[in-house]
Amino acid sequence: MGLFSKDIATLEDLYVHQLQDIYYAEQQIAKALPKMIEKATDPELRLGFETHLQETRGQIERLERVFELEVLTAKGVTCPAIDGIIKEANEVAGEVADKAVLDAALTAAAQAVEHYEISRYGTLIAWARQLGRDQSAKLYAETLAEEKATDDKLTKLADGKVNAAAERATA
């Protein structure tokens, strides 16, 4: 189903597509995080990825509750955006030899994922409210708060030590 296909004719259709899109995205993120955990060398970064993997699993469960509330089958639709972000992260990580620089690359990749999720959950909240789906909007808001908190932690980690360690490695 393309964004401008005949399958999407109403805000309701668009909302359901977006829900299926983020469901797929969260599943792909849950698959990618163990690889990021394995590659990360900074202990705080690794712990952050481990924590976010647990959060992501909870977010998937929360989305499944939304599907139940909406009386829909929980299923995803391919999300080229998240696939591209993950592919790019894998390519960059494969090209980085220095571990400190790799940690900086992983942090940046994780932030790209978070920014994508933040935009999607914000949109879902707005559309759910417009469609009178207040319970779903509350569930999305819980996840949005987690995504923003993760992004803040990544920013602090990058600014606090990861980027400086990467700079020292290349000097």
Image (spheres, rainbow, N blue to C red):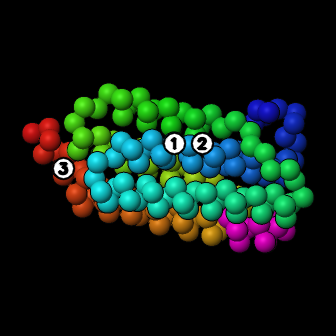
- Give the image location of residue 6, x and y in percent: 87, 33
Q: Which residue is mark 1?
A: 32
Q: Which residue is mark 3?
A: 165
- Which amino acid lies under the numbered mark 2 shown in the image of this protein? Gln
Residue at the far left: name it: 171
39 or 120, which lies in front? 39
- Give the image location of residue 24, x and y in percent: 68, 44
Gap between marks 2 and 3, in whole Å?
29 Å
- Which amino acid lies under the numbered mark 1 shown in the image of this protein? Ala
- Relative to 148, residue 111 above or below: above
Residue drawn at x 81%, y 57% as measured from the top left: 67
As drawn, is 11 to the left or to the right of 146?
right
In reply to whether residue 131 is colored magenta, the answer given is yes
Residue drawn at x 54%, y 66% as measured from the top left: 146
User: For the magenta stretch, what is the residue range?
Assistant: 129-140
Q: Nearer the viewer, mark 1 or mark 3?
A: 1
- Give the image location of residue 97, x and y in percent: 25, 31
As drawn, is 131 to the left or to the right of 162?
right
| Quadrant position of residue 156 | bottom left
Q: Is residue 66 visible?
A: yes
Secondary structure category for the residue under label 2: helix
Q: Which residue is mark 2?
A: 28
As drawn, is 141 to the left or to the right of 70?
left
Which quadrant, please, contains the C terminus? Answer: top left
The circle on residue 2 is none
Tell me which numbered mark, 1 or 3, is placed earlier along the sequence: 1
- Which amino acid lies under the numbered mark 3 shown in the image of this protein? Ala
118 or 20, which lies in front? 20
Badge 1: how crowded within 10 Å, few (<14), some, or many (20+)?
some
- Give the image location of residue 41, x and y in percent: 29, 48
